[in-house]
Amino acid sequence: MARRTRAKYCACGCGGLCKDQWLPGHDQRLRAAIEHEVGGLIELRRIVEERLHRSIDPRQSRKKGGSLHRHQANIFADKQSHIHRRSS
Ligand SMILES: [Zn+2]
């Protein structure tokens, strides 16, 4: 029986299979390799900025994941228990 796993190839190109986009640490490994290739993070930034025709502001780059599930908490806040009291 062939079980269907949701394994994907690691995005770094190592050929390893992983559930997510990366094998553990491989995103950092790729980043380090790119930095090494271009001559450092500053040079990498310069190249990317040149390519995008705009400057990269590190202060604006922290919306990576998170806060997506935040509104789900409201579902529970809406669940109130109503106690009906008999008044006769
Ligand atoms: Zn990899």
Image: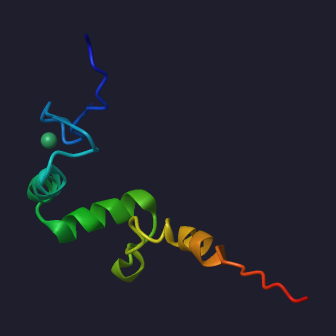
In the image, residue 84 sits, relative to residue 7, either above or below, namely below
User: From this viewpoint, which residue is outermost toward the right?
Assistant: 88
Give 54 or 72, whichever is nearer the viewer.
72
Give 19 or 48, whichever is nearer the viewer.
19
User: From this viewpoint, which residue is outermost toward the front?
Assistant: 88
Quadrant placement of the C terminus:
bottom right
**Residue 58 percent coordinates (x, y):** 34, 78
User: From this viewpoint, which residue is outermost toward the bottom?
Assistant: 87
**Residue 16 percent coordinates (x, y):** 13, 33
Determine whether, in the image, residue 50 is placed left or right of residue 74.
Answer: left
**Residue 56 percent coordinates (x, y):** 38, 73
Q: Locate residue 5: give its quadrant.
A: top left
Quadrant placement of the N terminus:
top left
Locate ligand 1 by image quadrant. top left
Give 4 or 49, whichever is nearer the viewer.
4
Residue at x 19% of width, y 42% of height? 12
Q: How many marks?
A: 0
Residue at x 41% of width, y 68% of height? 66
Determine whether, in the image, residue 57 is placed left or right of residue 87.
Answer: left
In the image, residue 6 sits, relative to residue 41, either above or below, namely above
Determine whether, in the image, residue 68 is placed left or right of residue 44.
Answer: right
